[in-house]
Image: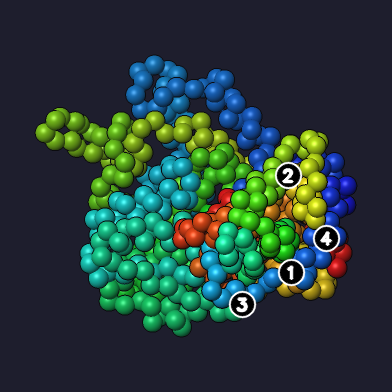
Amino acid sequence: MNAMWQEKAQIRRDFPLLGERCHGKPLVYLDNAATTQKPRAVIDRLSRFYAEENANVQRGVYALSERATALYERARVTVQRFVNAELPREIVFVRGTTEAINLVAAAWGRTRLNAGDEIVVSELEHHSNIVPWQIVCAEKGASLRVIPIDDAGDLRLDEYERVLTARTRLVSIVHVSNALGTVNPVKEIVRRAHARGIPVLVDGAQAVAHMPVDVQDLGCDFYAFSGHKVFGPTGTGVLYGRASLLEPLPPYQAGGGMIRSVTFDRTLYAEVPARFEAGTPDIGGAVTLACAIDYLNTVGLDEVASHERELLDYATSALCRIPGLRIIGEAREKAAILSFVVEGVHPHDIGTLLDREGVAVRAGHHCCQPLMTRLGLAATVRASLSLYNTRDDIDALATAVGHAREVFA
Amino acid sequence: MTSEVPELYQQLILEHNRNPRNFRMLEGGRRAEGHNPLCGDHLTVCVRIDHGVVTDASFLGSGCAIAKASASLMTDRVKGLDVAAARALAARFDRLVTAPAGSPVEDLGTLTAFAGVRLFPVRAKCALLAWRTLAAAIDARDDMVSTE
């Protein structure tokens, strides 16, 4: 643990769940790519909203509703600053990354795609950045093109050039691979797409809790992430959309809150972002997500990135010392995600044996079946780290993997 | 290592995982496929039935130790049973691995090795995949079997 982090050792104490035990062992939580644990401040914030501040937004004439509206819109500004969007109205609150991508696939895809058009994704994508595009492509007679990866898990940028054609309408690409940890060169990907006038969506689900993200610097047109992977509540998420792309789009869902006026002959839609937030939004969730972002900012994303980089190196060395263990994904730039397989032991058996040692990891295809097919694997074990993980956690992981090998020896 | 672990990973199971029996394709018989997409487990179970009796059974595919050992022990065990007896055994095996922890364990011979699965409810689907796929093969059903 680096010295700066040592001073912040109380970080672990901010997360009540990390003090729990599992099968009689201290919990070692290494499934942060699935969801992160929540600091006490976040848990209390959600509770306080419902205890003291709950009202519907944008409707009431009374003080409580005005205050809830102000909190909700202040949360939007917190998110705007978090990803450095130019304007608050470029931030749409959604249920998560999946809904954010579905929103763009529906609102943008249905109105901008024609027969013969192409959407570009990569072999690294999560199913949620594949299936929404397949659905809209089938509807429009468009098709998917795929940027391949090399054996290390890096995107083949030379192939990217070939995949982009005169028919490409959108590039939709993951920022950080949830299965391999590959950090994609998003800025370069955007530069090459924009040179051809093609907009870019970035799936940032695995990025925002681990590195500073600046959508203006990246240059992307859409950026999606989930609240629960950044210490916020489940069911919250964000779509950033550049105002010039978001504003001309039709609604995604219809209902209350997204209209300006309704008659049975004609309905005028609200301005963005309200146009994309039909129905009562998750107000308490958005307010709590803002609290999670405040927490993360207090710790400092640069420090988080440096702590996780150090821990990734430590974990990589520790795992590599285990005979028969092979790390899957050795990209040039990696986030703190370690996928691995162990000769002679199936990932699910490792998952079960680790669980009994109190070590929580994911075993499976990580919702990346095309990637697993590319790698020739049915499943991997995945340990994904976060700001509260320590070298002790890594030692516990390595010891438990060693024990699992002994069972199958 | 907690005490439940040796209950699940019995020596017999580990041995059949390492050296699965009847791990081959069976020409001319009935076959069915089982797939648990979340796990990635994928089995093909083949069965030959003559005059209502299972005369041969085999499997191919990949999966965790529980799924593979279950398929291996199953294919050994059902040979020589008539179809009704094979179905009845499948039902008893299902009860063996899904019964609440602490309830009586029925003696199913070698298959009793899987009684520890009941201590790991999320792994029941692994033990059952081969048996459900066998049932589909016997019925000559074409749909993909899943226990997820």
Q: Which residue is mark 1?
A: B20
| For marks 1 and 4 on the same chain, the one whose residue lies earlier in the sequence | 4
Q: Chain of mark 3?
A: A
The span from disc 2 to disc 3 (Cα, nearest Å) is 44 Å
Residue at image mark 2: B96
Respond whether the residues carrying marks 1 and 4 are from the same subunit: yes
The chain to which mark 2 is attached is B
Q: Position of residue A76 (x, y in %)?
A: 45, 40
Question: Gap in Å between the C-alphas at discs 4 and 2?
Answer: 16 Å
Give whichever of A353, A127 is nearer the camera.
A353
| Residue depicted at 11% across the width and 33% down the height | A265
Which amino acid does the dot numbered 4 rest on? Answer: Leu
Q: CA distance from mark 1 to mark 3?
A: 33 Å
Give the image quarter of residue A141: bottom left
| Residue annotated with mark 4 | B12
B145 or A277, which lies in front?
B145
